[in-house]
Image: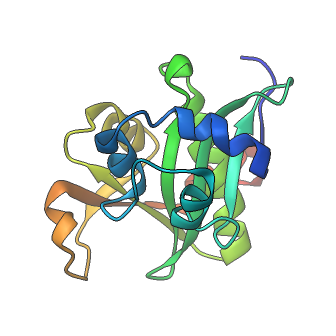
Amino acid sequence: MESLSLKPIEEWQFPTLMSWLPDKEQCQQWGGPNFRFPFELEAFLEDCRWPELPSYALQDSSDDLLAFGQYYQNLDRCHLSRLIVAPNHRGAGLGRALITQLAQIGAGALDTTECSLFVLRTNLAARRLYQKLGFVEAIYPEQREWLELCDFMVAPAEGFQPEQKKK
């Protein structure tokens, strides 16, 4: 696999990200039930809370946007959110690279020992990836109407550290 880097996303990259969400269903699966669609750049940036939330782009050596993700602190964990791989690059291992690097950065920045995420029950490919990366289902302690559509998963942050840093 070519050289990949995870960098804070820049505003000029958002139109590419927006193009990966061509309809309301895909937009709300990715962004949540309150994410507006159709969207213009200003509404999109507002709904994904950029630059309020740490937002990262997985890029190749040509700075092409290949994947996107965010993190924030939730329940004393590094919560990964709005994870997406470019449609024409799915199945190439980029989801693993995105999650591993984003978890390293986020858990380090937030000084947390666990990571968490939500996965739609119908998104079997994502669920398989998360399980391979060590995520297991857990009970979410709060009630949300949309929780009936997804599962909460957690994993130890140490599982995402580079090999030389593992104990």
Quarter the C terminus occupies:
bottom right
- Closest to the observer, 127 or 85: 85
Q: Name the spot of residue 79 as percent of width and height, x first.
A: 50, 66
- Closest to the observer, 83 or 167: 83
Is residue 93 in view?
yes
Quarter of the figure with residue 60: top right
Q: How many marks?
A: 0
Is 54 positioned to the left or the right of 136 in the image?
right
Is residue 7 in view?
no
Is 4 positioned to the left or the right of 25 in the image?
right
47 in relation to 1, above or below: below
Residue found at the far left of this picture: 148
- Residue drawn at (48%, 19%), measured in percent from left and top? 91
Is 111 positioned to the left or the right of 30 in the image?
right
94 in relation to 73, above or below: above
Quarter of the figure with residue 55: bottom right
- Residue drawn at (25%, 82%), measured in percent from left and top? 141
- Closest to the observer, 22 or 126: 22
Q: Name the spot of residue 155 as percent of width and height, x first.
A: 44, 59
- Residue drawn at (26%, 34%), measured in percent from left and top? 124
Q: Name the spot of residue 74 as percent of width and height, x first.
A: 47, 78
Quarter the N terminus occupies:
top right
- Residue drawn at (40%, 43%), measured in percent from left and top? 130
Q: Name the spot of residue 20 as percent of width and height, x first.
A: 51, 33
- Closest to the observer, 82 or 17: 17
Q: How is the image coloured?
A: rainbow
